[in-house]
Image (cartoon, rainbow, N blue to C red):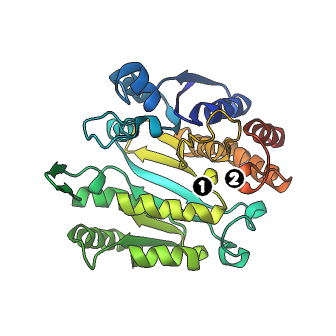
Amino acid sequence: MTTILALPGDGIGPEIMAAARRLLAQVGNFEIDERLVGGASIEANGTALTGEVLDACRSADAVLLAAVGGPRWDSTDPAAARPEQGLLGLRKGLGLFANLRPVRPRPALLDSSPLKRECIEGTDLLVVRELTGGIYFGERGRSGASAFDTCVYSEGEIERIARVAFRLARRKVTSVDKANILDTSRLWREVAERIAAEHRELEFEHLLVDNAAMQLVSRPASFDVILTENMFGDILSDEAAMLTGSLGMLPSASLGEDGPGLFEPVHGSAPDIAGSGRANPLAMFGSVALMLRFGLGMEREAAAVEAAMDSALESGLRTQDLGGSASTAEATEAVLAAL
């Protein structure tokens, strides 16, 4: 039987994970192994990710994560355990280097975006973000009144993420960097050009990250696949999320060379609404669809989940972040009924 390692995490995480488990029960027959991660694991075990949980993730067919973090664990002490260390530990421990964040405004929500309908119509893009290199993983430290974070990339790291982007592209790859300033970006550009030369059937362009941020809101429908490094991808994918009307609508997948992938909504743990029943479960449902497609090879079921989400929204489903009043439970019921 297919085993899914479920990590509810913190804040609204347990609520949207419960909704995801109801969805999975209707889609197929899965064995769900639920474990602690993030702040919940810090409270129970003193660390955001235990070796036992990481081993269980490695043995599963796919890993589904809800959310980690919250003000309870905020600290400026670099030695303090932080929930986000659990997520970074999962990425590193599972060898996940490619983060996929699809952005397709749902037809029923075109007027929910802060951008005009005519600007976002036809948008269907994929941000391919490198996950294990860059400034998030470079040497860092503090000395007196100074601090430093080092951005490092190797040719091999850039090449493997570029190959993912070109494999998934339908018509064009846009490589985003800051090559006018950064040496790591100049190397990124060189390697991206080399991989692009192997894919003459696809359009290819470079954009500096500041220009990309501007064009993402001025002409989003012109993008197909956006290839970028870790920090730039983190920022641009959150910006792109607003094209959909809410960060609560954006799913993601993190993949490696082999082994299980990690699937999670892009939004955070939203501690301000935790326990209120107001969390939007749709990004979590979208992450389930990505898990079915990229993690378990269940394309028909993935498409069915996505179609059910569209149908529920066309029928008027709106959670509070989308300007409506539907609760987590009501949103879940609407999608399950459509499915």
Look at mark 1 in the image and give the residue it sits on. Answer: 247
Q: In front: 241, or 229?
A: 241
Residue drawn 54% across and 69% down?
Answer: 224
Residue drawn 73% across and 45% down?
Answer: 304
Q: Is residue 229 above or below residue 196?
A: above
Residue drawn 55% across and 35% down?
Answer: 11
Name which residue type carries label 1.
Answer: Leu
Residue 103: x and y in percent read: 59, 61
State yes or no: discs 1 and 2 in contact (Cβ < 8 Å): yes
Residue drawn 66% across and 73% down?
Answer: 115
Q: Residue furthest right?
A: 315
Name which residue type carries label 2.
Answer: Asp
> Pointer 2: residues within 10 angstroms few (<14), some, or many (20+)?
some
Using the image, tell me which numbered label, if any, was put on residue 234.
none
Residue 13 seen in the current view: yes
Q: Is residue 35 above or below residue 85?
A: above
Q: Residue furthest front?
A: 145
Figure quadrant of the C terminus: top right
Q: In front: 164, or 324?
A: 324
Quadrant assignment, res 331: top right
Residue 284: x and y in percent read: 62, 42
Q: Earlier in the sequence, mark 1 or mark 2?
A: 1
Residue 164 seen in the current view: no
- Apparent side of residue 234 relative to residue 327 in the rendered image (left or right): left
- Apparent side of residue 259 relative to residue 26 in the rendered image (left or right): left
Label 1 to label 2: alpha-carbon separation: 9 Å
Using the image, tell me which numbered label, if any, was put on residue 321.
2
